[in-house]
Image: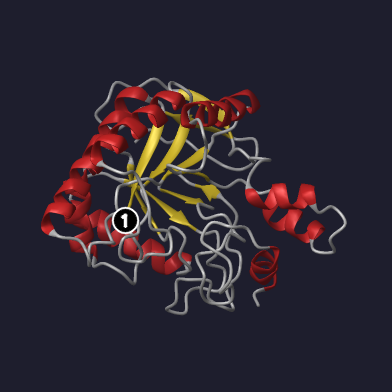
Amino acid sequence: MAVQLLSTGTTSMALAGPVNATRQSVTVSGLYVDPQLPAARWVAAHPTDKRAAAIRTAIGNQPMAHWFTGTSDPDLGKAVTKYTRSAQIAGKTPVLVAYNLPGRDACGAESAGGAASAAVYRKWIATFAAAIGARPAIVVLEPDSLGDFSCLSAAQISTRLALLNAAVRTLAEKAPNTWTYIDAGHADWTGPATMADRLLSAGVARAHGFAVNVSNFIGTADSRRYAEQVKAALHRPAGYVIDTSRNGNGGNGQWCNPAGRKLGKRSTANPAALELWIANPGNSDGRCGVAPAIKAGVFSPALAQRLISGG
């Protein structure tokens, strides 16, 4: 894994193709701040709201991931191209989340959905990867996919693993300057040895590594400890990403809009482990917790304000 240095400032980062692939290095500077993400759009639409300034500074102006699903954009290829091209023009690295597996969040249900079939997903991920093309990018692949096995049949698990392998392979071939990280759940979900086995079955050998704590609240130290345990159980080199977007107060055992959580450390990186805002703070986890009327993925200024204050 050819990492030099990455930061949200002006230092540079060398992005190269996947492990075991032919590498073409691209130098960029920092992470891309997307003006079209939910918090930024809300601030632009509500400039006189008394909460707007704090939300703009604490969330809207921060680099974080852009999530792509089967319903997020009427033209996936056009949307991904526009996003990654904007980042390229700015000389920044975009972070994307691919979230469209068939049976997505089947066990958690709040974000249930995904592609209608395996064939539809293969076409979707091919479009996604081709739209990134040679531009440098970081991709977090299918949150919850390897932790979310409890309600799946053996056949469904086999299909899911096959599709993850296909996605990793497609990204390696069509997006050679992308770092792909397969989601690996979080420290309170799946044991590290089990998760390592699942990652290997999902094709992590062709990826840059795995991601932990995506959309969860577990503290960075505990998340890093878990990631290192998973990495050791893989018995092979692997990088990892930690989602720090909402873990400033650590977890309380709840995952769906829990009270008392706080924004975490802003997106930074070092050669060993990326720390990124993968979840978009202020977006609801579902109709639950302190936001029982707000469906998953919808931005709420009240939720954003809670994360800013730790309330």
Q: Nearer the viewer, residue 153 or 35?
A: 153
Residue drawn at (59%, 72%) of the image: 291
Q: Nearer the viewer, residue 144 or 76?
A: 76
Image side of residue 282 versus residue 211, left or right:
right
Query: Which element carries disc 1, helix, strand or loop?
Result: loop
Residue 298: percent from left, percent from top: 58, 57
Image side of residue 4 versus residue 102, left or right:
right
Q: How is the image coloured?
A: secondary structure
The residue labelled by disc 1 is 184
Dividing the picture into quadrants, the one containing residue 309 is bottom right
Q: Quadrant of the C terminus?
A: bottom right
Dividing the picture into quadrants, the one containing residue 221 is bottom left
Q: Nearer the viewer, residue 202 or 159?
A: 159
Q: Is residue 124 above or below residue 293?
A: above
Q: Quadrant of the N terminus?
A: top left
For this orientation, the residue located farthest to the right is 48
Residue 153: percent from left, percent from top: 15, 60
Q: Is residue 192 above or below residue 103?
A: below
Residue drawn at (33%, 39%) of the image: 208
Residue drawn at (57%, 63%) of the image: 264
Image side of residue 11 versus residue 54, left or right:
left
Q: Is residue 133 above or below residue 106?
A: above
Residue 227: percent from left, percent from top: 33, 59
